[in-house]
Image (cartoon, rainbow, N blue to C red):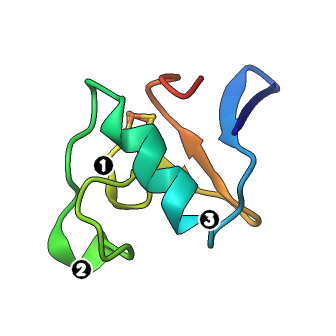
């Protein structure tokens, strides 16, 4: 679900792997929900809704390096 690339932790599921993104966040103690207009997933606790994800062209990076 994750890979290291240029020192960053990149989610390998892309932008539409809602189930994987929710599972990843469920096990993450660092999850903080982003403001409402930045949330894209229905399930509140999802990496897609996390303040520490930064969107990239194809996916997102976990700025906390928490993804494993
Ligand atoms: S984006 Fe990173 S910090 Fe946020 S829930 Fe996912 S793994 Fe955790």
- Point out the image quarter for the N terminus: top right
Q: Residue 29: image x %, image y %? A: 26, 24
Q: Which label number is shown at residue 63?
A: none
Which residue occupies the foreground of this view, 43 or 12?
43
Mark 1–mark 2 Cα distance, whole angstroms, equals 12 Å
Mark 3–mark 2 Cα distance, whole angstroms, equals 19 Å
Precedes in sequence: disc 3 or disc 2:
3
Please state which of the two labelled residues, at mark 3 or mark 2, is closer to the viewer. 3
| Quadrant of the picture in which ligand 1 is shown | top left
**SS at mark 1?**
loop
Precedes in sequence: disc 3 or disc 1:
3
Disc 1 crowd, CA 10 A, few/some/many (<14, 14-19, 20+): some
Q: Which residue is situated farthest in the right direction here?
A: 6
Q: Name the residue under label 2.
A: 37
Q: Residue 31: image x %, image y %? A: 27, 37
Say left or right for 62 vs 22. right
**SS at mark 3?**
loop
Q: Name the residue under label 1.
A: 51
- Which residue appears at 23% of the width and 63% of the height? 44
- Which residue appears at 75% of the width and 47% of the height? 12
43, above or below 59, in the image: below
- Which residue appears at 17% of the width and 65% of the height? 35
- Which residue appears at 21% of the width and 42% of the height? 32
Say left or right for 23 vs 11. left
Q: Which label number is shown at residue 17?
A: 3
For the residue with label 1, is its CB less than 8 Å from the closest atom of ligand 1? yes
Mark 3–mark 1 Cα distance, whole angstroms, equals 18 Å
Q: Residue 20: image x %, image y %? A: 56, 52
Say left or right for 61 vs 7. left
Disc 3 crowd, CA 10 A, few/some/many (<14, 14-19, 20+): some
């Amino acid at each position: 679900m994750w890979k290291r690339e240029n020192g960053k932790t990149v989610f390998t599921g892309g932008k539409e792997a809602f189930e994987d993104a929710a599972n990843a966040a469920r096990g993450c103690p660092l999850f903080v929900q982003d403001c409402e207009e930045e949330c894209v997933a229905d399930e509140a606790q999802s990496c897609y809704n996390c303040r520490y994800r930064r969107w990239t062209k194809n996916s997102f990076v976990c700025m906390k390096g928490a993804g494993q």
